[in-house]
Image (cartoon, rainbow, N blue to C red):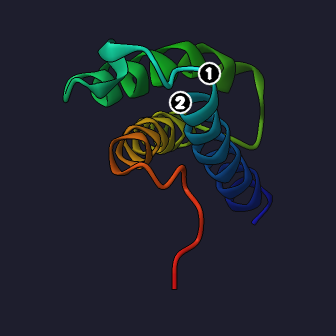
């Protein structure tokens, strides 16, 4: 149960952090708008997180993959917010 909570919290933190980073810091970077950018960033994040899963007893390789996927989705969502011009504001 603790592993699921840790995995969920990491996935949520990865998504929110990457989305805000793209919206605020990478707004004027053209490379983030390319379709391959979220895949590259997500794979890189999963590759970096994979060795850390050996050290922590409650998480596994699935957590690293989930973190990579959530960061990739966060980058894609942030880039979409920039293209739409709404900067991620909640709309009714």
Residue sitting at 49 percent across and 43 percent down? 74
Instruction: Find residue 84 and report its horizontal and vertical position in percent.
Output: 35, 51
Secondary structure, mark 1, is loop
Q: Quadrant of residue 53?
A: top right
Instruction: Find residue 73 and report its horizontal and vertical position in percent.
Output: 41, 45
Find out whether the residues at labels 1 and 2 contact each other: C-beta distance under 8 Å.
yes
Q: Is residue 78 above or below residue 50?
A: below
Circle on res. 22: 2
Secondary structure, mark 2, is helix
- Near mark 1 (Cα within 10 A), the count class, few <14, some 14-19 or many ≥20, is few
Q: Quadrant of residue 21?
A: top right
Q: Quadrant of residue 32?
A: top left
Residue sitting at 66 percent across and 57 percent down? 8
Circle on res. 36: none
Residue 54 or 81: which is nearer the viewer? Answer: 81
Q: Is residue 1 above or below residue 73?
A: below
Residue sitting at 34 percent across and 30 percent down? 38
Q: Is residue 3 left or right of residue 88?
A: right
Instruction: Find residue 70 and report its horizontal and vertical position in percent.
Output: 49, 45
Q: Calculate the distance from the C-alpha at mark 1 to the C-alpha at mark 2.
A: 6 Å
Q: Is residue 39 left or right of residue 46?
A: left
Instruction: Find residue 6 and report its horizontal and vertical position in percent.
Output: 75, 51
The residue at the far front in this view is: 85
Q: Is residue 60 above or below residue 12?
A: above
Q: Is residue 85 above or below residue 30?
A: below
Q: Which residue is mark 1?
A: 25
The residue at the far left in this view is: 35
């Amino acid at each position: 149960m603790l592993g699921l909570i840790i995995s969920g919290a990491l996935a949520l933190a990865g998504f929110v952090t990457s989305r805000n980073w793209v919206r605020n810091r990478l707004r004027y970077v053209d490379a983030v708008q390319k379709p391959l950018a979220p895949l590259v960033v997500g794979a890189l994040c999963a590759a970096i997180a994979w060795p850390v899963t050996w050290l922590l007893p409650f998480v596994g390789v699935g957590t690293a993959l989930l973190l990579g996927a959530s960061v990739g989705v966060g980058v894609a969502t942030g880039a979409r917010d920039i293209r739409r011009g709404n900067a991620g504001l909640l709309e009714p």
